[in-house]
Amino acid sequence: MSNLMCSTTSKIVLTATKDYCLKINSRTTGVLTFHRRLTISAAATPRLVPNPPDLIKWVRREGGFVHPSVRIAESGPYGLGLVASEEIPKGSELISLPEHIPLRFPVIESDNGDESFASLINLARYVPEELWAMRLGLKLLQERAKTGSFWWPYISNLPETFTVPIFFSGDDIKNLQYAPLLYQVNKRCRFLLDFEKEVRREVEDVKLQNHPFGGRGVDASSLGWAMSAVSSRAFRLHGKALQNGNGGDVPMMLPLIDMCNHSFNPNAEIVQEQGLGNPKMLVKVVAGTNIKERDHMTLNYGCLNNDLFLLDYGFVVPSNPYDCIELKYDGGLFDAASMAAGVSNPNFSSPAPWQQQILSKLNLEGEQALLKVTLGGPEVVEGRLLAALRALLTNDAETVQKHDLETLKSLSVKTPVGLATETAVLRTLIALCVIALNHFPTKIMEDETLLEKGVSTSMELALQFRIQKKSVIIDVMRDLTKRLKLLSSNESLASSS
């Protein structure tokens, strides 16, 4: 769904340590020493406070609507969720929030001379776009620190800790065994440590009445809590810009709605409505199917791979149809894979000029080249990678150039540049899968044995994640092997005839 949260990913190898991820600095400026710090305790309770206010009652009291059959209940490994106490027909309105209930980062026009607001805006400028959750996280921390905050009934119901990898121990981060995710985890940890320093500098000389966090100390741990709370619960929806016809996505935390769990086949959906006579916006959740008694209410968080589900939400989706593995397009690696596959005269390290032109069109060569390519997911083989292989594993420029790039990028087009070249392409791809699988130091059976022994939550997630990554590679190999066998049988038939 386009209105759901999104993120970006990248790749490279770095190592992490426990201190790197959960550094808690006890130093505060002199003016702040007598205030409670916003730090996450090691002995966590399920919610931020032991007995938080009733969230459903609060939403109703503030003018929202909650279907009488909607209940908050335990949802297995996902914590609390929304459950139907009796059957709810398709099309029924489940939850409706008027525009003052969602928590969002304030717009600049609402300053009104508030210096604490100005400090928050200044801090937000240090946050890169890909870590947008931290911007809204600043507002969340401000409201958490504020006595009598309007959103306290909601904030007090948030988890005290999250299962995202920035809170893993150093060993459990290493146990992910997957370089692109290790890079992202370390990048976020580094950002939090650096951002802690920026926060301290920004508020160092601020008077207590103008302090953005009410004088309370904010460190890397509390910043990580806020960023995780937002990344795991916020939605990107149309903000006020929609009223002017300009559109634009705005991250929002939606009390109660954000307790719906994820499913690729959800039974509910988010709808935004704006009445003709009332410019104020309602955010609703509507039943997309008949919801049976005891069924959990689910939304589709997006067609994401397991990297993003684990990074932002703290869980792994088994048999995720959108999961994939990342590889770096590297001439030496691909030469080695094609030679291992028995393919002679590969051109990856030294492509001909016409092949270089195709690589440039595929954005695999040049200063701005995007060298990350993927295997798995709906495409099985990323189209750019497939087109590059088809062009580089043949010397027949005329045959290649008579096809457009979309044809070369499609796996459903079986032999656009000939049977022999397609066979070489599939063999090279299978060899790449073998190389990728060998980069994991353990096998799936070993991982499953560890899971059966019982491990910590973070170790369990690390094991589940790497099992799924290896399964993706194996599934791709099986798919490509079937295609190769089919080509071989067609070649045999052609030879015999």
Image (cartoon, rainbow, N blue to C red):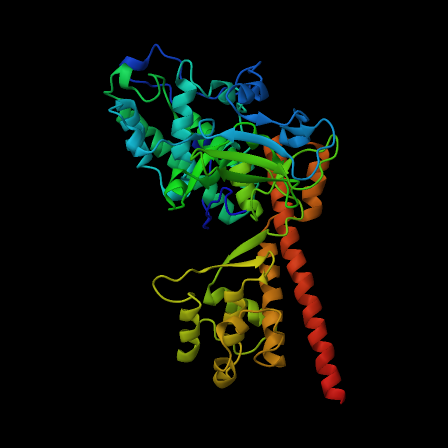
Closer to us: 97 or 30 = 97
Question: What is the number of callouts on the image?
Answer: 0
Q: Residue 217 in the image: x percent, y percent?
A: 36, 19
User: What is the quadrant of residue 475 in the picture?
Assistant: bottom right
- Residue 196 in sight: yes
Foreground of the two, 101 or 307: 101
Where is residue 125 drawn, in percent x and y? 30, 37
Residue projecting furthest to the top: 34
Q: On screen, 494 above or below 103?
A: below
Q: Which quadrant of the structure image shows residue 35?
A: top left
What's the residue at 72%, 40% (across, down)?
Answer: 449
- 395 relative to 373, above or below: below
Q: Please say if 413 is above or below 377.
A: below
Horizontally, residue 253 falls left or right of residue 301, namely: left
Q: Residue at x 40, y 70 (%)?
A: 360
Residue at far bottom of view: 497
In the picture, which quadrant includes the C terminus? bottom right
Q: Which residue shows up at 59% across the image and 61% down it? A: 379
Place of residue 327 in the rendered image (x, y in percent of width and height, measured from the top left): 51, 58
- Visible residue check, residue 23: no
- Residue 280 vs residue 302, the one in the foreground: 280
